[in-house]
Amino acid sequence: MKLLCEGLDLSNAVFKVVKAISAKTPHEVLEFIKLTAKDDYLTLLATDMEISIEKSIKAEILEEGETLVQGRLFNELVKKLEDEHLELSLDGTSLKVRYGESEGVIQTRDPEEFPKIDKNIAENSFTVTQKDFKSLINMTSFSCSQDDSRPVLKGCKISVDGDTVECVALDGFRLAVCKKKIISSTGNFGAVVPARTLVEITKLLEHDDENVTVVIQKNMLLVEVSSTVLISRLLEGDFIEYKNIIPSEFLTEIRATKESLLSSIERAAVVARGMKNLVKLDIRDGRMTVEASSELGNVKENVIINLNGKDLKIAFNSRYLTEVLRVIEGDAVHLYFNSSITPCVIMPQSGDEFLYLILPIRMSAD
């Protein structure tokens, strides 16, 4: 194998694929990136057997071939060579990287040791704008569970129905649902996709006005964007039927300015860390009092609101509130309540594309 390429192109490609390398793996070969020189391209591939990322760059191929290089080491080296014109050549079990009058050498491994990645995935698909797909994921994935005891909840349930794609995430304490219009699909279908996979896909989407096609077949997903192919395993198991837990009627509704509410809760959260992030909301007389106290101190602020319905005192984990207020779109939000011990629903003023449900924390009697 021997080729010429630009350092910046190679560095950008390595930066993308190295994200598929797990920090801890029992299989040493999964710490490596596979390099394949063929035709007019250098193709890089990395995997942890859950997610695989492949990136191709233009190169002048002087001799075709393939090899394996230690991923993080290679990443660190080529990051320092972004302004160089590079020559890569395989010499036995070493990869020589020449730049100017200098040279670096990296030990390699037999490419036959690398696992085979099946890219023959084409059964079901949907196409959506990159902007809408990023919004779909950013507004839900933060609500996925981090608990290994329920692995299916560590992903988002993506469902295609007619001209709409719906993404759902929940962790037992909160639920996020987002819907977007799609451009086309092969039909109605659904799958549970790991949150990590979806976040990595959004990092590949650099042109909001262009489209992205998501392809799903059995237990695999494939997305191709700008010469980068991401393949991921899907999660198996029964996802919770969330629609049964969303209340249809409410006794209290408030409208608040998103930024003022977020700012108050963020300030209260500073002292709430000493009390398991507990923030209390006292809703009455056209204002909401946001309060938190602990051995660290106390914060008490009033937020102007529009109130429709009964007064209410309720408490939440501050993180569950701030995370949704940071991603929800629009200048105003609506919050819906029934009691201090039943779920709260948060929606943007702009419409029904997004819904967030959060369970309160029981407060001790004053």
Image (tube, grey):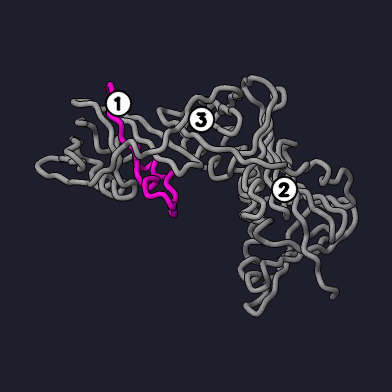
Q: In the depicted view, which residue is nearer to us: 235 or 113?
A: 113
Residue type for callout 3: Val
Residue at x-position 58% and y-position 24%: 127
Residue 336 is left or right of residue 17, and the answer is right
* Labels 2 and 1: the sequence-earlier one: 1
The number of numbered badges drawn on the structure is: 3
Residue 340: quadrant of the picture: bottom right
- Give the residue at mark 2: 175
Per the image, label 3 sits on a secondary structure element best described as strand
Which stretch appears magenta? 13-41
- Closer to us: 46 or 76: 46
What amino acid is at disc 1?
A: Tyr
* SS at circle 1: strand
Horizontal relation, residue 173 to residue 252: left or right: left
Q: Amino acid at mark 2?
A: Leu
Question: Mark 2 to mark 1: distance in Å?
Answer: 44 Å
Residue 229 in sight here? yes
Q: Answer few, some or many: residues within 10 Å of disc 2's Cα (few below 14, many 20 plus, some between 14 and 19).
A: many
